[in-house]
Amino acid sequence: MMHRHTQPTVHPVQHIDFIKPHVFDVTEDVRLLWMKDVPNDTVRLDLFFDAGIIRGDKSIPAIVHSLLFSGTATKSSVEIHESIDALGGFLDTDLSFETAVVSIYCLRENLDKIALLVGEAINGLSFRESEVEDTLRSMGQKFRENQQKVRNVSQQQFRRLLFESHEDYSTLAQVSDFDEVNYTAMKHYFKDHYLNGLTRITLVGNVEQDSVDALIDLFGKWAVDCQPVFGKSFETTQKRNHFLVDGAVQTAIRMGKMMFPKNHPDYIGFQFLNTILGDYFGSRLMSNIREDKGYTYGIGSVIMELHNDGYFVIVTEVGKDVTEATLIEIQFELKRLQEEPVSGEELDLVRNYMLGQLLKSADGPYAMLDMYNSVDMYGIDLGFYDRAIAEIRAMQPERLQELAKTHLNWEDFLIVTAG
């Protein structure tokens, strides 16, 4: 019988029973990770390429990424997508700092056919003149529109200044990048970073071993010759910069600093500290700057991961007249974490929230493979999550104060405003 006035028993998270994927060596430097135990007929296949935006100039990485399924010598873009749609497949692509990803979603019975279509589309990419011109026109228009948005301006300028010591990470797109068609540069980039740029394959689906072998044969020829090299030890000399955006009624604030990679001993503890500060709806930044002061609809903070490094950033948009007041309140919250111990009530709230999020992130084979991938890509084993659970459960106010005093000093922050 259900007792509606009795609170359910709370069981603390001790351990997550992960199912490890099967691992296959495509080459010495490239692996395929396969999560087979899926209780339905769905499949997701991800192809990772060393084709992030740091790998080329003149916006070539973004342009080529947008053209991947734009047509071959025998099939147009429409025909490629219609063929995949007819088999119930769906394509998704993502381009980040250091990686480009092509994802395929389908039913397992059609995986082999859709994989062949994707392989033919990429391998036979012909850079059709009409498709290239349409893509450049669309990207150029979107770029011009984004230059009028304070959020985009602050994001780009923050990146440029934070990574100023490394040209590949700090160079920004220019409107002229989309006005000039350089077929030679695009074709060279495509060959080097896609046809010879595959770094990893992940597969979730209850398929047969023959399908896995076929995927290795099909995509293995794109494998990189050696492990890619990424930047590290970034430095910035900047502290405060404002960028004027004509007609803007708001100011975008983006402030942060370089931190550390995922394998750093302070990583998990700082995640706890960051959650208190700005990484959930009840965070201190939200409670103060949104709920109490009414300066913004939303504010948050996050730790961004890179292969060899990481950075911490606080992001919000506020009215122009409260820009300085907002910065004062952010500084106040950082200082409060350094000077005042976190209460037991807040500590337990965030502890339970983080453990709950960790459980949620491991719900099902798709999520488990993503979690495995998110540590394996940095050379970390699954023991990371047990260590995270143990550290979250043992977290104390003194440890959080120590972390705040080490990593949240106001004078260390780069502050970028746009408006």
Image: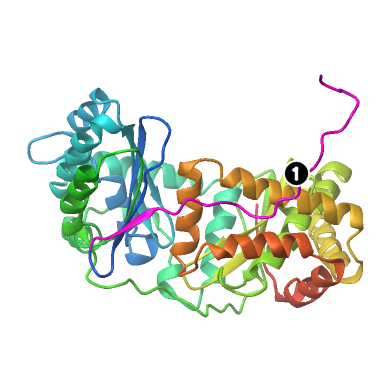
Left or right for 180, reference 33: left
Which image quarter is the N terminus in? top right
Of residue 156 and residue 279, the one placed in the foreground of this image is: 279
Q: Regarding mark 1 in the picture, which secondary structure is present there?
A: loop
Residue occupying image coordinates x 38% and y 65%: 54
Q: Which residues are magenta?
A: 1-26
Q: How many marks?
A: 1
Q: Is residue 358 magenta?
A: no
Residue occupying image coordinates x 64% and y 65%: 387
Left or right for 326, reference 134: right
Residue 347 visible somewhere in the drawing: yes
Left or right for 39, reference 156: left
Return the x and y of residue 260 as percentages of the image width and height. 59, 73
Residue 179 visible somewhere in the drawing: no
Query: What residue does disc 1 label?
Result: 281
Residue occupying image coordinates x 86% and y 23%: 3
